Image (cartoon, coloured by chain):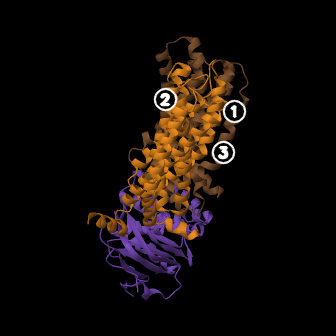
Amino acid sequence: MPTHPSPSPHHTRATQALLEGLGLTGARGGRTLFEEFGFRLGPGELLQIEGPNGCGKTTLLRILCLLALPEAGEVRWNGMPAEEVRPDYLAQLAFLGHSPGIKADLTPRENLRVAAALGTSPTHGINGVEEALARLGLEAQGDTPVGELSAGQGRRAALARLSVQGARLWILDEPLTALDREAKQRVEALLEGHCGSGGMAILSTHQSMELRDTAVTRIQLGATVRAGEA
Amino acid sequence: MWLWFHRLASPKHFYRVAERLNPWLGSATLVVLIVGLYWGLVIAPPDYEQGDSYRIIFVHVPAAWMSLFVYAVMAGAGAVTLVWRLKVAEAVMRAAAPLGAWFTFLALVTGSLWGKPMWGTYWVWDARLTSELILLFLYLGFIALQSAMEDRRTAARAGAVLALVGVVNIPIIHYSVEWWATLHQGPTVTKLDAPSISLTMLAPLLVMALGFLLHFATTGLIRARCELLEGEARSGWVRELARRRRT
Amino acid sequence: MVRAFAAILGRDLVLALRRRGELGNPLVFFVVVVTLFPLALGPAQETLARIAPGILWVAALLAATLAMEALFRSDFEDGSLEQLLLSPHPPALLLLAKVAAHWLATGLPLILISPLLALFVNLPGQALPVLVATLALGTPTLSLVGAIGVALTVGLRRGGLLLALLVLPLYVPVLIFAAGAVDNAAAGLSAAGPIYFLAALLVLAVTLAPPATAASVRISLG
């Protein structure tokens, strides 16, 4: 089955939605970036946020991570306001933003161990470190400090963090930047595996992705296009 | 009552109420301050020890009271900012800071002017003056933080945390400075406040304190209105207001 | 939760060891500032002994303040700080782990070198244990309170001077009680009172500062 670029998320609402955005309005420095943005996301689904630079993709993702406050609207997890169930929600959330979230002075292996310890199931996470390294093709670089790796390898190490955190929801801001073709395929495989096992992902990217078995919803973000309404 | 508070929390409504209150508060400030000053400087009897130089307390003491009161207002508004994220509370907090700093500064200047006839020098490391000085530093830190942050709402919430941290610290600082003053007590330390104050002096003092309070309310509301206009410049009601003023 | 605390503490200590070069900076600063006083005041032993507690504590306080600035900077730049907020564990606890690691790396060395500096400024010998005790109780308080200021200024480009402006007034009680205790001890009096106060301030700071720091980090990243 090819990816189906459906204009509205309602086409994919076959399953129970776990994450919902209701009437989200985002602003940066007093300027409104998007208004009345809404969406629903259920297990196994992937949401791709598209739009030109400066349309508020990063702001939206940070609002969904509860890192930024929306001007209006609400993020709901399991039918509850996410702020109210913050620890439960965050336990199910892994975020990769513009900055990698790993330390350059530590090796990928050390970084992943710390990430696992901060996650919900540390033991499971630490056991998954080697597998996560292998999945992103970093077996050989496991003990080299991240700062000495190439930009693409560093990015892959940051992506490997996602799988040791044991979260159901991945929120990724431009995960494909600085990745070569082969690494991009690995990330696609990672996303397919994640969504295939009931996970969810929201990501912003300019690139088109080849995901065969995942229900992908694409949403255009912008103050003029009020996606998700109706 | 609750509804009234709720309406007051909207910037538009607060602005209107403040606009209507301002002329009344302003006139009341003027009247009370004139009465207080005349009473304190002319009618009240001279002190039997300090003569006329004690009269500076009619400015010094209210300014010192206000310096603490305004910080409490800031911290209260800060708590509301953090809990309910009210723009009005943010505006009140930011409006209060420079006023509080001025009251503190005034208390310091008048305190040191008073010190000259009493101690023969403009500055003595007296416990009260030292506490006031540190309070001034707290105000200046708050103001510096506000001007360093670009996003107004982030700045307001950061300032709210700082104001609350400050308000927890003020009693500790005050106590530690008192302890420090007793530790290093010199031979001629006199307390700034008279041990007992006669009614003829207390009454004008209280009138002056009321005048200072009214002055703070007046200027605070004017400044809060400016803050709201700046912060809400893009919203409908400010545009509407600007349009009506122009025509 | 303990595991997450230990993970952050361990990570930051490893990072501090990997950047050994930076570890010495506050220490050298401490030594240099203390050296400046005899140069400014003259080498007269009695003068120095009289103001030794003040010199040592002001220098330690400035060194601690300067070191604070780096507390969250690299974590802010590489996104580790937002990851802390996204952990299901209470951010106040994880930030406390960071402050603890930072104190072990920058505050503890100040304490260890203080006897040498006490010698420099001719601090009476009986005051030395009190000096060490006040540093041990006082500098963690400075780190905890300072962390709030660092968290508030972490997103600003030139936060260093502003940080000092924000936190130095808050450091006044620690300075007063600590220097007062050493002063008392140097004069042969009991230093127990101010030391108890320092301990109380530390307890207060451990309880109240981490939640305020967490709130500040959240605001700065928002």
Q: Which residue is mark 3?
A: C204
Q: Using the rendered view, name the quadrant where residue B80 is placed.
A: bottom right
Label 2 packing within 10 angstroms: few (<14), some (14-19), many (20+):
few
Residue A146 is left or right of residue C57, and the answer is left
Q: Nearer the viewer, residue A148 or C222?
A: C222
**Subunit bearing disc 1:** C
Which of label 2 and label 3 is nearer to you? 3
Q: Residue at x 65, y 33 (%)?
A: B198
Q: Nearer the viewer, residue B69 or C167?
A: B69
Q: Nearer the viewer, residue C170 or C14?
A: C170
Colour assignment, chain A? purple
Image x and y of residue B245, in percent? 30, 63
Colour assignment, chain B? orange
- Against A16, residue B174 (above or below) is above
Q: Using the rendered view, name the quadrant where residue A90 is placed.
A: bottom right
Which of label 1 and label 2 is nearer to you? 1
Circles 1 and 3 on the same subunit = yes
- Quadrant of the rendering where the C terminus of chain A is positioned: bottom left
- Against C75, residue A66 (above or below) is below
Q: What's the CA distance linking mark 1 and mark 3?
A: 14 Å
Tell me which label, 2 or 3, sits earlier in the chain.
2
SS of the residue at dot 2? helix
Residue C17 is left or right of residue A187, and the answer is right
Q: Nearer the viewer, residue B82 or A182?
A: B82
Q: Which residue is mark 1?
A: C195
Q: What's the CA distance linking mark 1 and mark 2?
A: 27 Å
Q: What's the CA distance linking mark 2 and mark 3?
A: 30 Å
